[in-house]
Image (tube, rainbow, N blue to C red):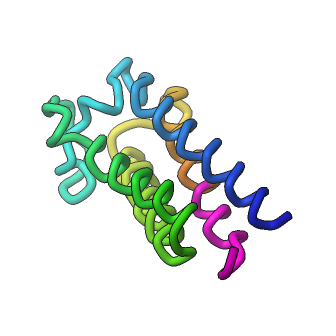
Amino acid sequence: MRALMSWLMCLVGVAVVAFGAFRAWYEDRVGTTLPLSDLFSGVTRESAPVLGSLTLPLAIGALLAVVGMFRAKGILQLGGIILAATMVVWVVRAREVVDLGDLQVGAWNALFGSLLVLAAGILRPGRL
């Protein structure tokens, strides 16, 4: 039963993260245009190509989570940690530029979806 709940939580979480990445995060800016450098140097108003945006760590984390659903608990947990860390760091950095109330649905979807994937990694049994 734990395995089924973990799989469902992971699939829903990955879907919500993917949905959130293509929605507006703040000031009607889509997550796929936010530079990856925002995680390290603070949120800017610059745009980035898809491979240089926050889409890259979100895609890597989601891919690891899906692979971890079928392979190993540790891979799923690593994917969840990458997703959650990316989102938490971005939200903390975004607070320097915008008020949390100004964050739009895409950022919240990606944040809560990543936390759902992280919870699925914790819930998943070691052996299936």
Q: Quadrant of residue 97?
A: top left
Q: In this view, does 50 lie to the left or right of 109?
A: left
Q: Within the magenta stretch, is there residue 122?
A: yes
Highlighted range, magenta:
117-128
Whether 22 is drawn above or below 61: the answer is above
Q: Quadrant of residue 7?
A: bottom right
Q: Which residue is drawn at 47% across and 67% down?
A: 81
Q: Within the magenta stretch, is there residue 101?
A: no
Q: Which residue is drawn at 55% across and 33% down?
A: 101
Whether 80 is drawn above or below 112: the answer is below
Q: Is residue 103 shown to the viewer in this render? A: no
Q: In this view, does 25 lie to the left or right of 77?
A: left
Whether 78 is drawn above or below 60: the answer is below
Q: Residue extending furthest bottom?
A: 126
Q: Is residue 12 shown to the viewer in this render? A: yes
Residue 113 placement (x, y as % from top left): 58, 46
Whether 103 is drawn above or below 17: the answer is above
Q: Which residue is drawn at 50% across and 54% down?
A: 66
Residue 43 placement (x, y as % from top left): 26, 44
Q: Residue extending furthest right?
A: 1
| Quadrant in which the C terminus appears | bottom right
Residue 41 placement (x, y as % from top left): 18, 55
| Quadrant in which the N terminus appears | bottom right
